[in-house]
């Protein structure tokens, strides 16, 4: 059994041009050295029933031994405000609104100027039983107050604490914002602690955690799960009412000489800065990308998008398992030679070769054909948004529905077993945080176990079946990436006569959709060899590469449901959710759109009358239309399966579309997606419902362009069957060769 | 927050329905009759007796029985002496353990 996790790493940047450098950030807890080799990936799938793992080794200066060391990962979000004199008033009071999401089980700090290494300072937090606590301690001892009733999960509280140096009086207050029906956990406690505590020096103020050490960038612990809204800090022990007014107002008077800091989290939503509106300008930095653009305690449902009234979105949801950047030291660096082909590449790391447990681990990167440097007429668009959306998916480990959905006992890889134990890698946007809320961000500054050779098949590995097939049939092609299309738009696509979107291009930003639309309207030819494409609306970070965001909202095939009012993307302010609910159903772009999953098995298509249309005779040349199309395949034994799309004129399938073939007998395993059901009734599954199906579609676009869609994820893994000589391969080849021929498609506008 | 509760699948298991057992034994990977689908849904949704899974030892060839711990960060429990050479064989083995957990009947 190959050990795929003894050494892990990430490449930065994830996508490079020939002539640019890529660096590898590696860590191994047990190995001090491995053998490194750069590989170009032709097929990433070791399944012996398929093409098998196929890697080219071009030979590079960094091929050879590489030294390794253990580099721990520090998950958990927090806001860090570096120490300044204003943060050490003799007396003080602090308050904010909180919405705890996992109040039980362990100590958590909400607002803290606390040094865990010294046990000194002050911290407002929760104890392991969910009680609000306020701890004040100096070198000569301290005092901890505790509210009698524990916080209730996902209920807003106003919390406040004060310390008066001259008297040593300490207060702690908790007020439930909805104090009825059993939800009132309010309480107020007063105690006498030491007088005139000498606060620890060089101690950062931390929200949602506490410092383990001195300095402006400390390691943190006791991470809090939940929202914090409008934290305030004053240099005097304010009475509860006055502190609450200061928390409720959106803009405390900056001229109040007692005001130390008042943080407004509704500013600069896309960034990692938090802004203090006091004159002290105690701005802070967010660590590990907690969820922004969250409804605050003052959100009243009058708007559901934060752009409309950002002041109602002054909360940040911190998670103890947030992870955005491992921060590993840079290891080997490599400059991609200027004459290299674009493609899927990886650094292969091997060790213990010849043993029973040889190490074979890959760190992926992509070499793009850069803007303005197309070397081919054909391009494959790598779905990096999809790869990142699925990055380190623990769905099969955590989610109740997984085995029922997948229609059988779950087969895990060694990567999955590692991920079960090592949640510090950060999970995917399919997963929930440890507090049950959804992951909305995914970054690439961390190892991504399922975006590399030998990884789980969805989706990187499946896509490499198309690469293997292109190589086998000697197609000349470039590889470009979807994130570059977001950045450069249609001009990147326009360099190609034909582009392929592979097995599952599910996640698209507005600019990516617009670019494909413009490309198709400008005569571009688009081959969509997948299923459930162009489905979710996402955003890429406006400046930081390889950071994507999704809000799942309350429609669509969603593995977690967003909270009310929180469907606006923090990166851009756009609404997120399904493209179908944003006036851009996939059918309008590619003729077909997601309608169902089928995991029991995959099925063949049956040819329809449109396939005999002489205008597409080239498409079916050499294919027997009396025979099923794709009654074979590596995924479920057919070409139509896993996730499938159908033609739907009411959702925008163009009138000129030819529906060439369909797989509409998907039996009881064909399960329609949620947005396909208007009302609840029986008879919706594939054994009774003709709308549960995969359709093969072709239509011409303006200026000589065209679109061909297969509407099935399983298609890609049928291409290589029977030594690449099969009907799925033949149809795909026919389409590509015709799409690369500039002759227009005649007879559609008569 | 929408929650999937494991105990939501409540189709009543009838220990006298040995016909479903024999159907499963004959065709572990389906297609399945209507009632066997219901029984499998009950078993798969609830993950009765903790959730049995497989760990792939050799892609497409050999799988080891394992069980999820139900808590994040905790290692998966493995059963190295229970290795299957087909997914159908594994599916049947897991079914048999779940049938016993639900009915008390040991299957040979």
Image (cartoon, rainbow, N blue to C red):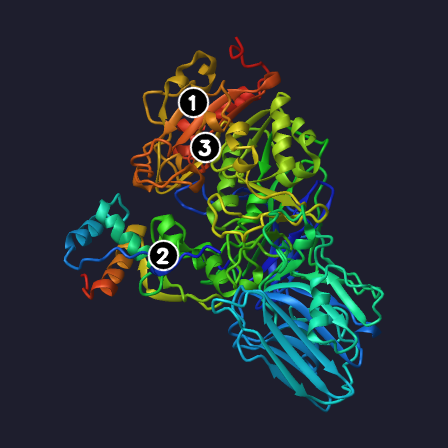
> Tag 3 or tag 1, which sits nearer the N-term?
1
Q: Nearer the viewer, residue A326 or A515?
A: A515
Tell me where residue A233 sits by quadrant. Answer: bottom right
Whether residue B69 is visible to the viewer of this picture, yes or no, is yes
Q: Are marks 1 and 3 in contact (CB under 8 Å)?
A: no
Tell me where residue A51 sits by quadrant. Answer: top left
- What residue would you read off at disc 2? B63
Q: Residue at x 24, y 63 (%)?
A: B102
Q: Real-space Cα distance between discs 2 and 1?
A: 41 Å
Q: Real-space Cα distance between discs 2 and 3?
A: 31 Å
Q: Is residue A147 above or below residue A407?
A: below
Left or right: A582, with A682 as reference point: right
Which element carries disc 3, helix, strand or loop?
loop
Left or right: B34, with A107 as reference point: left
- What residue would you read off at disc 3? A711
- What residue would you read off at disc 1? A659
């Amino acid at each position: 059994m190959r050990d795929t996790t003894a050494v892990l790493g990430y490449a930065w940047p994830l996508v490079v041009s020939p002539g640019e450098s890529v660096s590898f950030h590696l860590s191994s807890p047990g190995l001090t050295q491995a053998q490194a080799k750069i590989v170009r990936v032709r097929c990433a799938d070791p399944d012996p029933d398929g093409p098998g793992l196929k890697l080219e080794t071009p030979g590079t200066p960094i091929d050879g031994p590489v030294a390794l060391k253990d580099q721990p990962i520090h998950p958990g979000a927090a806001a860090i405000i570096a120490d300044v004199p204003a943060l050490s008033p003799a007396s003080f009071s602090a308050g904010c609104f909180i919405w705890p999401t996992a109040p039980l089980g362990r100590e958590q700090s909400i607002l803290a100027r606390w040094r865990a290494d010294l046990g000194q300072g002050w911290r407002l937090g929760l104890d392991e039983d969910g009680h609000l606590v306020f701890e004040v301690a100096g070198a000569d001892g301290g005092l901890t107050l505790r509210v009698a009733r524990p916080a209730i999960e996902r209920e807003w509280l106003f919390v406040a604490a004060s310390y008066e140096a001259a008297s040593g009086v300490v207060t702690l207050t908790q007020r439930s914002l909805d104090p009825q029906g059993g939800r009132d956990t309010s309480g107020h406690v007063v105690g006498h602690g030491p007088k005139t505590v000498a606060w620890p020096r060089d101690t950062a103020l931390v929200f949602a955690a506490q410092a383990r050490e001195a300095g402006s960038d400390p390691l943190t612990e006791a991470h809090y799960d939940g929202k914090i809204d409008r934290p305030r800090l004053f240099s005097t022990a304010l009475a509860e009412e006055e502190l609450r007014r200061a928390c409720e107002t959106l803009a405390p008077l900056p001229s109040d000489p007692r005001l130390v800091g008042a943080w407004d989290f509704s500013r600069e939503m896309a960034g990692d800065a938090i802004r203090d509106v006091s004159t002290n300008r105690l701005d802070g930095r967010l660590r590990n990308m907690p969820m922004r653009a969250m409804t605050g305690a003052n959100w009243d449902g009058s708007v559901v998008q934060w752009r409309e009234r950002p002041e109602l979105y002054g909360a940040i949801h911190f998670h103890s398992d947030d992870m955005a950047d491992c921060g590993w030291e840079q290891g080997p660096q490599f400059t991609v030679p200027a004459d290299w082909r674009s493609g899927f590449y990886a650094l292969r790391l091997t060790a213990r070769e010849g043993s029973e447990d040889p190490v074979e681990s890959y760190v992926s990167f992509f070499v793009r054909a850069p803007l303005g440097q197309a070397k081919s007429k054909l391009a494959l668009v790598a779905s990096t948004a999809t790869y990142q959306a699925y990055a380190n998916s623990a769905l099969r480990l955590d989610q109740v529905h997984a085995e029922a959905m997948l229609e059988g006992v779950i087969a895990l890889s060694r990567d999955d077993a590692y991920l079960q134990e090592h949640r510090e890698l950060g999970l995917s946007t399919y997963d929930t945080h440890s507090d049950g809320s959804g992951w909305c961000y995914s970054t690439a500054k961390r190892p991504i176990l399922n975006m590399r050779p030998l990884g789980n098949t969805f989706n990187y590995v499946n896509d490499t079946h198309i690469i293997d097939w292109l190589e086998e049939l000697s197609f000349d092609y470039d590889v470009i990436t979807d994130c570059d299309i977001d950045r450069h738009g249609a001009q990147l696509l326009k360099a190609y006569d034909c582009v392929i979107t592979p097995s599952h291009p599910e996640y698209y930003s507005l600019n990516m959709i617009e670019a494909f639309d413009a490309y198709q309207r400008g005569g571009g030819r688009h081959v969509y060899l997948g299923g459930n494409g162009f489905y979710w609306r996402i955003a890429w970070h406006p400046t930081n590469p390889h950071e994507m965001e999704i809000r799942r909202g309350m429609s669509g095939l969603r593995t977690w449901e967003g909270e009310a009012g929180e469907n606006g993307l923090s990166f851009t302010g756009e609404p997120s959710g399904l493209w179908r609910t944003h006036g851009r159903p996939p059918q309008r772009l590619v003729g077909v759109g997601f309608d169902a999953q089928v995991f029991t098995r995959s099925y063949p298509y049956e040819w329809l009358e449109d396939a005999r249309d002489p205008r597409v005779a080239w498409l079916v040349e050499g294919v027997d239309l009396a025979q099923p199309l794709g009654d074979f395949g590596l995924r479920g034994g057919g070409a139509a399966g896993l996730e499938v799309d159908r033609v739907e004129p009411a959702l925008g399938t163009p009138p000129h579309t030819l529906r060439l073939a369909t797989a509409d007998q998907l039996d009881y395993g064909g399960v329609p997606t949620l947005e396909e059901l208007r009302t609840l009734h029986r008879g919706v599954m594939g054994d009774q419902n003709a709308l549960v199906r995969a359709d093969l579609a072709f239509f011409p676009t303006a200026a000589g362009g065209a679109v061909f869609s297969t509407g099935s994820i399983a298609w890609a893994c049928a291409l290589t069957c029977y030594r690449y000589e099969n009907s799925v391969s033949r149809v795909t080849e026919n389409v590509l060769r015709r799409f690369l021929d500039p002759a227009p498609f005649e007879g559609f506008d008569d | 927050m929408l929650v999937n509760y494991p105990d939501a699948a409540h189709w009543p298991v009838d220990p006298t329905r040995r016909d479903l057992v024999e159907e499963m034994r004959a065709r572990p990977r389906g297609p399945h009759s209507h009632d066997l689908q219901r029984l499998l849904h009950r078993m798969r949704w609830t993950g009765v007796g903790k959730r049995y899974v497989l760990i792939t030892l050799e892609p497409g060839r050999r799988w080891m029985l394992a069980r999820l711990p139900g808590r994040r960060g905790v290692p998966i429990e493995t059963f190295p002496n229970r290795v299957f050479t087909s997914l159908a064989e594994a599916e049947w083995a897991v079914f048999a353990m779940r049938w016993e957990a639900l009915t008390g009947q040991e299957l040979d």
